[in-house]
Image (cartoon, rainbow, N blue to C red):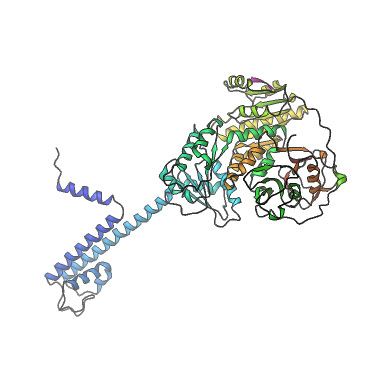
Amino acid sequence: MKKIRLKERIRFEFDHLMSKGPLPPFLFLIFTSFIFLWIIALIVYYFNLIPSNAQQILGLPDTKNYNLLNVFWVVLLRTLDGGVISDDPIDFFYLLFMLIATLLGLTMTSVFIGIVSSVVMDKINELRKGRSFVLAKNHTVILGWSFQVFQIISELVIANENQKKPTIVVLAEKDKVEMDDEIRAKVGDTKNTRVICRTGNPIDLRDLEVANLNQAKSIIIIAPDVPEPDSYVIKTILAITNNPNRKPLPEKYHIVAEIRHPRNVPIAEIAGRDEVQLVVFDYVVSRIIAQTCRQPGLSVVFTELLDFKGDEIYFAYEPKLVGKTFVEAMFAYETSTIIGLRKRDGEILLKPPMNMKIEEGDKVIAISEDDDTIILSGILDYHIDPGAIRTEPQVKERRPENTLILGWNRRAPLIISELDKYVLKGSKLVVVSDLSYVERTILEINYELENHEISFVYGDTTDRRVLDNLVVEQFDHIIVLSQTEMLDVQSVDARTLSTLLHLRDIADRTEHRFSIVSEMLDDRNRELAEITHADDFIVSVKLDSLMLSQISENKELKTIFETLFSAANPSIYIKPAEYYVELGRPVNFYTVLEAARQRNEIAIGYKLHEAKPRYATDSMLAYGVRVNPIKSNRIFFSEGDKIIVIADEQ
């Protein structure tokens, strides 16, 4: 066994002391300096090295009568201020020890500066790591990281514009500096909202403490881009709700979590109980795609309702409406559109009976620019033009429909299932994909369908020969899906763009009109895709991010969105304007609202065939869609224009 020497022991203890942080080295420096100063003072004092013939020495009251403490003070002054030695009397031994004291002071100062500098740099590095506790209240916490973060933050910034000192905290397993840089580059100006990034694992209880969840108004859990994202989300929910330091019951968290696969919803609900609102990503996107392919322009309506930039859905209590009917409330607002009631017991009714009485404690559900713009107009004369209102047209007899799905991803089975709810028996659906397992999946789906006859064609959707052989002009609706199995988002959207360009050329060549709905992953590619003249672009990730943002502000919105985005009644429909008012005749939107009321519907906006203003006070419309127009403004509709309504059936 090796014998440990004293030198090695001293070195070990010294290294151990230095590794304990900045305070032990600092105390060690003070202690050793103090010892050396006393040694010098003792030598000078006992060997009487102070010149007796000196008239004055700075720090010494009397050169002939002094004590050890006086000498220590003289040495200390030379240590703290090296310039003092220049005024000392010339005596070799005295100056030698004063010089040693001065050099000791310089050394001590240098080491002290080094320690302070090290402490400051360590603190800066610690802050850059994002491990410090967040001192904020009523803030929104985002747990996890994906490219959805930028869209969510952008929406919350807009939502917080009328709030005082709003804060967003992002906690993810990513370097804080990288998160700050990416948010700064992709979100830009956050206006009055402060965005704080922290590095940590959302399923680690200690890391969650950093985000101060107990003081947060809402928590958004994002599914990461990993093979099993739902398991990560569920574990994060458990880490929050079962944390020993959680918010004391009966107080509850407001958690909004994204679940990718519907099969994981039951276990996520068990984990979060009544504290979590689940947004099932695949359900949301598949329902919107299924509805939009049959009603071109519907995706823009959904985006307008979900986007904080435009008009959103709010709840408002108005005591002056108590005792009035729902239809009276509909006409009582000039700049807001009333679509339902929230009863005082929490029940949410979209498009309730027109004669339903509003009771004390009931709130109106309104589409409005902001929560502070839901104001009674006080208008009594709505200038409705009865002569412009058209009677309900004779309903055209429906027929089976032909739908073509180009591409495949995990949402395709849900889209097919949703489409089957809308079409008549005998409708046909063709799926084209170059993935070998799709044919087997379609055979399994076929047994569950009631109205569709489904078939599969193996082929590359970007190959023009494959598309020509399909004779696409025989189809009523075409859906182009993103092949999300590919990891690169831009490559996925590039394939989609190639398919859309081929379809546009085929449509121009055959002069055949069919509706095309395309799924995109990156919203920036939407502008590039517009040259293909597709009817709708479903930016799936954006819609999911918008819904997460909206529900984080008000959890009751989940019920409304689930109703509007499903095949159940009531839902949003886009119908020809001539069904409601006379074309080419100037009318205000009160007239349109009355025409819809006579058919037991609620008019919430319109879609112009040409995306340009029809009256001077209007701004450029989003793809021709205007939700919640000012009701007194006059507008004339022409052929191809549509009215957006909430109705029980199409």
Q: Give the camera-side residue of 312 and 489.
A: 312
Q: Is residue 75 left or right of residue 633?
A: left
| Residue at far left of view | 47
Q: Is residue 453 magenta?
A: yes
Residue 225 visible in rendering:
no
Relative to 296, residue 84 above or below:
below
Q: Is residue 253 magenta?
A: no
Pinpoint residue 31: horizontal percent, then vertical percent.
Answer: 23, 60
Q: Is residue 588 left or right of residue 107?
A: right
| Residue at far bottom of view | 55
Pinpoint residue 133: horizontal percent, then vertical percent.
Answer: 43, 51
Relative to 218, residue 566 above or below:
above
Magenta region, residue range: 452-464
- Image mark count: 0
Residue 492 visible in rendering:
yes
User: Quarter holding the N terminus?
Assistant: top left
| Residue at far right of view | 387
Q: Is residue 1 left or right of residue 423?
A: left
Q: Give the camera-side residue of 263 and 92.
A: 263
User: Quarter holding the C terminus?
Assistant: top right
- Among the 4 quarters of the image, the one containing residue 203: top left
Pinpoint residue 324: horizontal percent, then vertical percent.
Answer: 74, 51
Residue for point 83% across, 42% down:
581
Pinpoint residue 462: horizontal percent, then vertical percent.
Answer: 64, 27
Q: Give the camera-side residue of 181 and 261.
A: 261
Relative to 123, residue 56 above or below:
below
